Amino acid sequence: QVQLVESGGGLVQPGGSLRLSCVVSGGITNILATGWYRQAPGKQRELVADISDTGLTNIAHSVKGRFTISRANAKNTVYLQMNSLKPEDTAVYYCVVDLVGKRYWGQGTQVTVAS
């Protein structure tokens, strides 16, 4: 059974940093891409960043220059390094894994940016 477990969320002051981690388990192979979405209260879920199986990254304009996505294939882990955090980054962050014809979601981790 595929499982995605996120960690690293929390409360941080504006200008601070957090690193989110997502461990993918379940013996899956042929991952096409992994990524992070977020959903703020009252807003639609939006893509933050993703990384393809070839290492090509795609970063949302709103976080470009502040957030970085990376992965450790040997650990089946994808990371989201978030720097210079702003209050508008406050949201639940979800990890996703794309296989051929299927997408899996993590349970989400809360990130709150407030002073």
Image: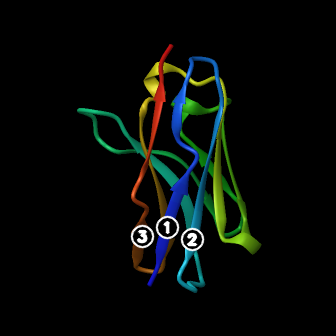
Tell me which corner region of the image, top left, top right, bottom left or bottom right, holds residue 72: bottom right
Q: Which mark is residue 104?
A: 3
Q: Are marks 3 and 2 in contact (CB under 8 Å)?
A: yes
> Could you tell me how far apart the alpha carbons at marks 3 and 1 are, in whole angstroms?
8 Å
> Could you tell me how far apart the alpha carbons at marks 3 and 2 are, in whole angstroms?
10 Å
> Could you tell me how far apart the alpha carbons at marks 1 and 2 are, in whole angstroms?
5 Å
Dot 1 amino acid type: Leu
Q: Earlier in the sequence, mark 3 or mark 1?
A: 1
Q: Are marks 3 and 1 in contact (CB under 8 Å)?
A: yes
Q: Are marks 1 and 2 in contact (CB under 8 Å)?
A: yes
**Residue 104 picture location, percent across and down:** 42, 70
Residue farthest to the left? 42
Question: Helix or strand or loop: what does disc 3 sit on?
Answer: strand
**Residue 68 picture location, percent across and down:** 68, 42
- Residue under numbered circle 2: 24
Question: Helix or strand or loop: what does disc 1 sit on?
Answer: strand
Question: Looking at the picture, does residue 14 appear above or below residue 93?
Answer: above
Question: Helix or strand or loop: what does disc 2 sit on?
Answer: strand
In percent of the image, x 47 and y 61: which residue is there? 96
Tell me which corner region of the image, top left, top right, bottom left or bottom right, holds residue 66: top right
Instruction: Check disc 1: other Cα within 10 Å, few if <14, some if 14-19, many if 20+.
Output: many
